[in-house]
Each structure stands twice: as structure tokens, then as C-alpha cells.
Amino acid sequence: MYVAIAGASGYTGLELLRILENYQGIKINQVTSRQYAGRALKDVFPVFNKSKNQNLVFSQELDFKSSDIYFLCLPHDASLEVAKQLYDNGKTVIDLSAAYRIKDSKIYPNYYNFEHKFEDLLSKAVYGLPEVYRESIKSAKLIANPGCYPTATILGLYPILKNNLIEENSIIIVNALSGISGAGRHLKEDFMYPEGYSNVYAYNLTKHRHTPEMEDVVKNITGKNISIRFTPHIIPISRGMLSTITVEVDISKKDLKDLYYQTYKDEYFIRLQERPSRIKEVIGTNFCDIYVDYDEKNKMAVITSAIDNLSKGASSQAVQNMNILLGKPENYCLQHLPLFP
Amino acid sequence: MYVAIAGASGYTGLELLRILENYQGIKINQVTSRQYAGRALKDVFPVFNKSKNQNLVFSQELDFKSSDIYFLCLPHDASLEVAKQLYDNGKTVIDLSAAYRIKDSKIYPNYYNFEHKFEDLLSKAVYGLPEVYRESIKSAKLIANPGCYPTATILGLYPILKNNLIEENSIIIVNALSGISGAGRHLKEDFMYPEGYSNVYAYNLTKHRHTPEMEDVVKNITGKNISIRFTPHIIPISRGMLSTITVEVDISKKDLKDLYYQTYKDEYFIRLQERPSRIKEVIGTNFCDIYVDYDEKNKMAVITSAIDNLSKGASSQAVQNMNILLGKPENYCLQHLPLFP
Amino acid sequence: MYVAIAGASGYTGLELLRILENYQGIKINQVTSRQYAGRALKDVFPVFNKSKNQNLVFSQELDFKSSDIYFLCLPHDASLEVAKQLYDNGKTVIDLSAAYRIKDSKIYPNYYNFEHKFEDLLSKAVYGLPEVYRESIKSAKLIANPGCYPTATILGLYPILKNNLIEENSIIIVNALSGISGAGRHLKEDFMYPEGYSNVYAYNLTKHRHTPEMEDVVKNITGKNISIRFTPHIIPISRGMLSTITVEVDISKKDLKDLYYQTYKDEYFIRLQERPSRIKEVIGTNFCDIYVDYDEKNKMAVITSAIDNLSKGASSQAVQNMNILLGKPENYCLQHLPLFP
Amino acid sequence: MYVAIAGASGYTGLELLRILENYQGIKINQVTSRQYAGRALKDVFPVFNKSKNQNLVFSQELDFKSSDIYFLCLPHDASLEVAKQLYDNGKTVIDLSAAYRIKDSKIYPNYYNFEHKFEDLLSKAVYGLPEVYRESIKSAKLIANPGCYPTATILGLYPILKNNLIEENSIIIVNALSGISGAGRHLKEDFMYPEGYSNVYAYNLTKHRHTPEMEDVVKNITGKNISIRFTPHIIPISRGMLSTITVEVDISKKDLKDLYYQTYKDEYFIRLQERPSRIKEVIGTNFCDIYVDYDEKNKMAVITSAIDNLSKGASSQAVQNMNILLGKPENYCLQHLPLFP
């Protein structure tokens, strides 16, 4: 089984290479990178010294034939085209961009600045959140790997959504925190070490691309129009994400907790914690740590959901999806514990 | 003018010593500390080497007579008693604890584990938030210096509260982030460097002492019963706090922004920023940086308010209060800019 | 094969639990902890939620019979006794303390405040640095797992030492940097997050316990009296260590580099890097990243050697030693790559 | 008195603006910046909101006439020319670049890639390290403000150098650590937050520009040829620098300490500490915290010297120099204490 990683020199591409290091039965036969074409992995990133892939050479262009599974770590508009061509070539595609995530294609011009010209393929793409869409993933040819904020948030809400406890036209309040790696490997003064140091701030308060993605999934699960009032923040760590969700639900604290334990009792990657979930405890893993509490005075559930934005929020979730596609145990190669401390 | 700092070896006490270093016309004549009684400031804290107060010796007990102004950086229940005795001795007290902050005395047993036995004095205490209660502060004898979360949150909401734009029985959603210094100088594994490193988490989700303090002030300003749904989080920085407030208000974005600029046009310490406020830009200062935006789809104001939890959230606000008491310019000794980067 | 971890609730004990999570063919059947006796691993450390060991209960006392291999993560003086008893019981011991590291027993009273009363056993203990003492480790019953600073430093110097390029009575200058986890899980103000934040400083400048350990190993390898002038520093990260070594050697830059590549050409865990080694690139792994350069003007080699103090500097090196003892591939369970970024 | 800052949008320029905020008797009448020409200070850097200079507009070109004192925060080769022109115009220049620091002009082509074509002016320039060259600074027209590493290192060595305790042809070992702001405001992947996070490494091991600067000053003070074996490192903080110096000296520990206390007894900015100096305790100040110890076995002094690289290592030292020039108290505007914690 040959595997390609397109856009392999960005953070999610490198994270895939890290995770796949000990994956048996596949061979990574191409990695692409505009910036580093012609150079070996180890020479650009000495962190890969002693990796079995250390001598892989970044290529400029993606070969659409020589691999079986393609992980796309490309800009959204590039992914739109590449995924289509691969699909037409009969390849299996796991797309880490947003190009095929949102079923409502009208979102794209407004939020991503392009028309979605492959609506037919969009309708066939499966949203790669295994805890919600496992069955569809098994036979998918194009998996739209979810965004990081939607992964943390939807998993934090899923027991409530699945049981349809939120009323039509409600507003869910989501305040989320992301490590700076979420911004990708793009040079910008704000993300320089000295300027990120000790700094925390909200951004894109009234228009973030993950808002319609979350609302789309919520609608797909519940059939209802429910708004997400989403406020993302940057925090001064490299990796890690926390979504804090506040939502009106009419339920007892005990029933709410039972609902979560029941819904997730067979999910390896969902760890229900008995005190608020901590970012440190998921870094480098595919775990999503969830804590649920209930504010009886205000009749609101308060849920915190922690993931590693580059792992469960991107690359290890992509590997989880590949495991499902290949019929492997879902936690194959994904069972290690996080560093502590 | 003689000044005492009770509990001077905690973070807020040390912060007072730092801020008052160049304050003219006062003399700090006593600093108390159980832990370090008998030792000189510089010997315990070499960071005070070359300070004019470096040879001040921590005393075990507070002398109720020899100073004119008393800053109390004591546990809440100790402050309750000490403030009363000082008040009865005719002294001026700036109390950094919560002992005299909440007018509704019934809150104390439930949230602070003591009965408030000095209700008469409680009613005379002035809540030391100058941007809201400046006039009363001028003649106060006992100032209840506000908590850090309430300072950031109330200042972030004040233009809306003052203009009574929130409906009775509404719920304001407040998600706030605090540097670890907010936990004080208490030894605990969670606050050790390795365990705090890369870690972020919510705490006290359904019962935090600052919730009733905020609700009490909101009620005092608006006359309405309005709930605060408050979720505080720990973030891995030493100092700094961000309060992100989401609240339904029926107003245009332009009017909302105008309201903030108008309300705060003469306030030196309120900096209205044109992009979301950043913790780094207030550290070590008395500034409160506020950004206000409006989500038209959900008809909600989203406000971010950043302070330094130990400064505007505690000690520099206490000095601002002293400036008002002494008839000094309100920003006396408080005009420096933060470090950047 | 049954494995015990004594002192399992400290950082090196927890790190062993993390690393052994996926180790096949062993069963951890006892973990001891004074502080948490009677409580389950997961309840004290929720980071172990979903671990196969999550329900292991910390016991107060170590059972000297029921396990085959004992990892000791105990204070030095406790280890001295426990290792002796286990050895006498015929057990295999991997001791992470310093109790059996230094062949010159006269060092102990001066540096560790106890007489080494088991000199016979001390002489049988094998210093568990596989790249230097692999052959002896294979048949050892008591392995003295090296200190973190000695591991980084000796591996950084080994090609020079092995080839005896340093003159008798020379002084090697070692400046080293350690993340705060190196101080262990001990509550102290200096190691609180706010006080460790942005802080860097040297400590134990003229008397650090790792100095005689390093000098002892250097003498064992070279047969010469060579001094180590050792200055350790604390840096504000959780894990990671860098040893920067400056030493007079009369050699060309090319020959020096060749010597390193030649000496380490078959060592999986030694990664010779072509730019100065970086702490980030070894965290969570058993790698030791080494960079060697030569200052021709001053005729000095300058070497930087990076490890994770809790991994190659303690627990993963202990597992490497167990692999050797058990005849497993030396990198069994130790082949993953570090997180990047 | 009119003051210009050339290159005001870099970190040292911004730091000058911060420090001069409350300086009486001067007016900053021009700030230049290629990148931000035409934009107001506050608009580019909202951290200057409420500064008295917030509406200063960055200009493209420096006006050589309209100011009295010019701080140059320019690239070295640009400074070479600009300082010359200003000097010829009779202006006072404080140059934060290296263009006029090294008396031995032959260093420039090799280390800075330009011929020093103004040797006459170079000979007139005064090295602006007040604790060493105070008298010459008083009447200087061109001050070459020292580099950060040389400031920390020379001040750490000065009592030994002044008393000529080091032998001809000795080698002083200097290992130094710098926060990432020392790299300036230049976009580079290595200095991005995620890649700098948890990272520490040496750089420029055998050729760093500050080596000849230090050797030049050492020669000027001692008259001897003494080598500096200098190894700088990057550490993951924004600001702060520590120089750890190891040098053979034949003296007793007591005499060594006395020498330091005697030499520096009247220096406000030198704080001799009784435990190793800590970076955190000098950040944002002009202090240089020094600790001196003696390794009797190896007959070596070990000295640690901590400064803020952007303050005493650049901009606040420049202000200290201006204070001397203007006949102000040397610590005017520089007397505040650092933040703690």
C-alpha cells in the first residue's frame, strides 16, 4: 500500500510523517513541498534524523498515479482540484483541507473565496469524524478530515446533539483556545516567539471559517437550525486546543453525565474526565478529553473538550480514518500516552 | 504619610512594593509576613536589591497605630477582622481581599465559609472600581478593592450596563483566562512549572467566588437581576487575564462601538483597541484594554477585556484608589507602558 | 515477566509507566507511592485514563518477591537499602537513583550524606550507559541507571574519551541546562509556574552531585585524572537538557567530526546533527542529539549534547537497559519520533 | 532638546520609545521606519495606545538637522554612514549598531562584511559602557552602544580585568543564553512561536560577531591578548540574557568576592547577588545582576551575569548614556523594579 502526503512540509504533513513512522504495511512513496522540492526530509528537518523516511526527497509535483492513499495537506483551493482529480483516478483521498467538509456549498464563496465547482463530489465526500460518521467512513473514497475547532466542539456536544436536547434556533456559545501551531507554518510578526510570548487574544470574532462547518454538522445531526456563537483565541503554547461550550439544556446534572458516559462508553479516543479536561493531557495523542458539568441556576450545560489541534484536530484523526478504511483496529498506531509532565 | 502592607510577601503585596517604589510623599513603615517575619525584604526576595525598601524587615504582627493607610493582602477571613479594627481606629483601609466587596452579606457563608459579622461596616465600604465608583471612593475610609475577574468583566460590560441595555433575567456568558499568579503563592502540584507547562483548563465551573461579586455589582449598576454564567480557566503564563463576554443586546455595531468610546473617552486606564485586546499589552500596567464587536446574526455583543490580574486586577488598582483618596492625579506612578515584546 | 516500579508517582516513575504502555511480554504488577497509597493510577493522574494500567493501585510498601524486574525511582538512601535486599533475593534491579553509580565509594558521604555500606555490591553494579558499557549490561543483576547530566555529557565526550585525546589533569568545561522537571515533583516556591516563568539561572555552581559521577566515569574510560568544571542551569521548560562542552583537544576539525561519525555509526540513539543540537528535537524520546565543532583559534572542541532529562536521562534509558537484559532489540518500544513543532 | 530614533519599529527602537515615555525635558520629534512609513505609532503598535507619542508618524527618511540627539537602531552598514553624516553635522549620536564599537577596524570586513571607511571617526567613538568608560562618555559626540552579550560579559568580568588577574594568552570560557528577541524582528521559521517553544540550542559556535567585540574591550582594559571562547545559545523566553563565565584566576574565594563588592560599591545598576543571578529579576530594567563564585579545586572563578538584552543590553543602556551626556542622574527614568513574579 503506497501513501502520498501532499504538502508534507507544513505542520500537519510533518505530523503525519511522525505518526506513520511505525505504521506497518504502508510505504510513503511521495511527499511534496513547493518550498523544499529536491531536498531530503532529514536535511530540511533534522528532527527526522534516524526516521525510516529520513531520505525521502520532497518533490515539486504530486504524481496522481503512483500512490494508493493520498493525504492532502494543501491550501483549500488547491485541495479542491487535486481531490477531484485523484477521485476521478480512483484513488482514496483523505483531505485535511476544508474543500469538501461543508455540505452547504453556498458557504464556500463567502468563507473561502471560491465557488465550489464540484458539488457532486462534495455530496459524496464523508466528513471524517469517526465517533459520529464511522459507518460512512468505512466505504468512503474521499474523506473530508474535520477542522480542529469543529472536532473538539462537535465531540464535546455530540451526546446532546444526538439526543436532540437543544431547541431549534438556539444559540450555542463556544469559546475556544488554540496553540499557535494552528496558524500553520506561515511567517507573520504576530506568531514570532517574542510577540506570541505571554500573549493571549481572541481573533476572527464575527467571521471564522469553522463556524459554518460546525453549524453544518450540527444541522446534519439534529435536523435543526442551531447557531454557533464562536469566539476563538490564540494561547501561547505550540499545540493543544480547548473548546468550552455553554448551552441551554433542560436536564439534571446526573442525567447529563450519564448521557455522556453512555454515548461514549465504547469510544477509545474519548476520555471522559472527572475534573475539567486539560490540554496538556492530550498533546501528541488522538485523545479527546471531555468534561461535562451542569449549571443548575442557569440551566446550562458547560462542557470542556480538549484535543491536540495537529493530532485529533488534523493528522492523527486522518490516520484514525485510514485505519477504518483499511479495516485495522481504529487505534492502531495511536495508542501511546501523552508526555507528563 | 505612613503606609502599611499586611501580608506583604504574597504576590499582591510584593506588587504593591514594586509599584510604590517611586511614589513620593509616602513611607512604607511596616510590612507583615508570617512566613518571613524577622527577615529583610532583600534577603527573602533578592529582586528588591537596590530598592529603597530593601532593608525593610517583615514583622509578624500588624501595628494598628503607626501607619495612616493600610493595604490588606490577607486571607478573606483575616481581613474581615483587621479591616474592622483599623476602621475603628480611624485608619484608611484598602482591602485587597473580598471581605467587604459584596453588599449582599448572605453570600459570605455560602461562598467564603464565614458569616459576615460586620454588616454595618460592609454597607459603608466602597467598591474600589474607580471607573464606576470614583465619586464614592474620594471620601471612603474602607475601600474594597475588586477581584481580578470582576475588574476585567465589569469594565468590559460597563457601557452596556450603565445604559441598561440588558434585559432583566438575562444571562451574560463570561469565559475568562487567568495567568497562574492568580492562584497566589501557594504550593500545589498543579501550579508547579512542569505541570503548568503547556497546560490550560477550566476550573470551578459551577461555583466560583467571583460570580456573586460580579452579579452584585451588575445589580447595583442596573437595578436588575442578571445572571453571570462564568467559566474561568488557567493559562500557562505568569500574569495576565482576559475576559471574553458574550451578551445579547439589541443595537447596531456602530452604536455599540460609539457607546464604548463615549463612555470611556475620559478614562486614562481604559484603552479601547481596534483589534481584539491582547494580554501581553497590559502586563505590568494599570491599563484595561477593551475590544467590542457585534455579532449581527445572533444579536450578541462580544467583548474582550484584558488586564494584568496582579495590577489592575489587584495592586495597581489599589494604588489608583490611593491616588484618588490623596487627591493625586489618578495615574500618578501608573503611567508607564508595558514591555514589548 | 513481572515488573515493579518503586516510587511510581514521581516524574521518572510516571515516565516509565508511559513508556511501558505498549511493551509486550511484561506485566507491571506493583507500583508504590507513599503519598498516594491505596489510590488507583487513573484517579490520581487522569492522564492515564484509557491506559491498560489505569486501575493499578499504588501500594505503600514494595513486595520483594512478586516481581522479576524492579525499577527503583526512590531517594538515594532508600535505594541503597532496597537494591541490596532485592539483589540478595536474586531479583534484577534497575536503580534510577545514584546509590550504585559511583565506583569511588568515598564520594558518598561528602555528596550524598551517607556512608556506602555495600561496597561489594557497588563493585558489582553496572553503570547503565549502553553506548559505553553495553557488554557488561547484558549480564548485570544491578544496573545503576546514569544521572541525566552525566548521560548527556559523557555521550557528548565519549569519542574523545575513548580515543584518549584529553591530557591528564585537564579541565573539561561543562555548562548544562535542564528543564524544571529535573528537580522532581517537590513543592518549592522557586519551581512554581509564576516564579519559574521567564527565569533562568545557574545553581550548585561549586558542588553538584553529578560532578563526581562524571569524573568517575571519565576516569574509568580514560584511566586519567581529568576534572569536570560543571555549571548546571535551570531553564523554563518542563523537559529537556543540553550539555555544552568545551575541551582542549589537538586535532583538526575534519578528524574530530570523523571520529564522532565513526564512533557512533552503529548507535541508533545517537543522532549526530549537522547544526547545533536542539532540545525540542529529543523531547519524549531516547535520542541523544550531538553536534561537534572545533574552534581552531583556541584549539578547543565545542560539543552540544541534547537529551530529554526524564527519558534518555532517566526512564527511557532504563527501558533501553531492560531491552538489553531481556535480549530484545535495543530500541524496542523506543522508536517513535519527537513532536514537531 | 529634540530626539530622533532611526529604525524605531524594531525591538530596540520600540524599547527606547517605552523607556522615554516619562523622560522630562526631551521631545521625540522623528521616528523612522521603512516598513511602516506614513503610519502612526499607535496604529502599527496598539501597545502604544495612551502613550504621549501615540500619534507620532513613522517617516521614511531621517532628517539630519531637526533633532539634537540621534539614537540609531539601524543595520550596521547603514549606521556606519548615518553616524558619520550626523557627526559631521555636529549632532550627538548614540549608535546601537556595532559600526563604531570595535577599535581594531580590521575586524569589520571579516565579521561584518564591510570595510570600515571612517577610521578617524571610529577612533573618536566612545564605547558606551558607563561602568567602565563613564568619564569618556561625558564628553562624547558619538557613543557606540555596546552589544548585549559584551555588556553582560564585560560587566561580569570587569573587577577581574581591572585588577589584571588574568594571564596573557589565557582563554576565558563564556557560555551565554539569550531570549529570542535578541534576534530582532526578522521573520524566520526558527523564531516562530511553535518552533521556538521548548527549544534551546547553541548557534554561531565558532564565529559570532560579539567575540571580537569582547576581545577588543578586554584588550583595551588589560593591555593583554586574551581569548574569549564564546558559545551563545537561544532560550525560549522573549527577553533576558545570562552570561556564565569560567576563568582561571589565582585568588581566594573571599578576596574574589571582596573585589567585586569593592569595585561595584557605587554602581547603582550593578546588583551583586548572594545566590546565582536570575534572568527574571532584571527583565525590563537596566540592572545587571552578578553572582561570583570560586571553584577552589580547579582554581577558576565562575561568574553569572544577567541583563535584559533589549534594556541594559541595548536601549536602557543607551538612555543611561544619554543621562550622562545630559548631566542627569545616571539612573534618571531607569529606577523601576522588575515584575515579580
Image (cartoon, coloured by chain):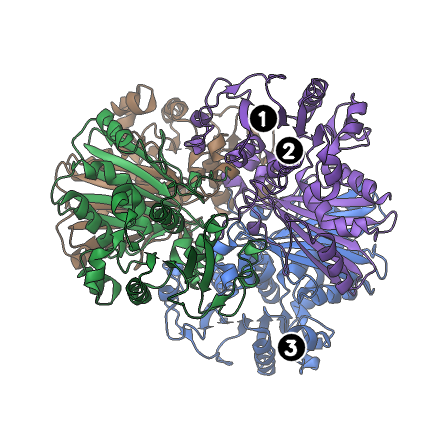
Chain colours: A blue, B purple, C brown, D green
Chain ID at mark 3:
A
Q: Amino acid at mark 3?
A: Asn
Chain ID at mark 1:
B
Image coordinates for residue D203, horizontal then vertical, percent? 31, 55
Contact (Cβ within 8 Å) of mark 3 with mark 2:
no
In the rendered structure, the answer to whether residue A260 lies left or right of residue A43 reads right
D236 w.r.t. C225: above or below: below
Tell me the residue at 49%/25% (across/down): C63
Location of mark 2 (residue): B326
Tell me the residue at 78%/53% (across/down): B247
Tell me the element at label 2: helix
Residue C215: image quadrant is: top left
Q: Amino acid at mark 1?
A: Met
Question: How packed is label 1: few (under 14 Cα within 10 Å), some, or many (20 or more)?
Answer: few
- Residue C68 visible at all: no
- Residue A313 visible at all: yes
Question: How packed is label 3: few (under 14 Cα within 10 Å), some, or many (20 or more)?
Answer: few
- What whole-number distance in Å separates the C-alpha atoms at marks 1 and 2? 10 Å
Q: Which mark is residue B37?
A: none
Location of mark 3 (residue): A113
Residue A182: image quadrant is: bottom right
Residue C204: image quadrant is: top left
Tell me the element at label 3: loop
Location of mark 1 (residue): B1
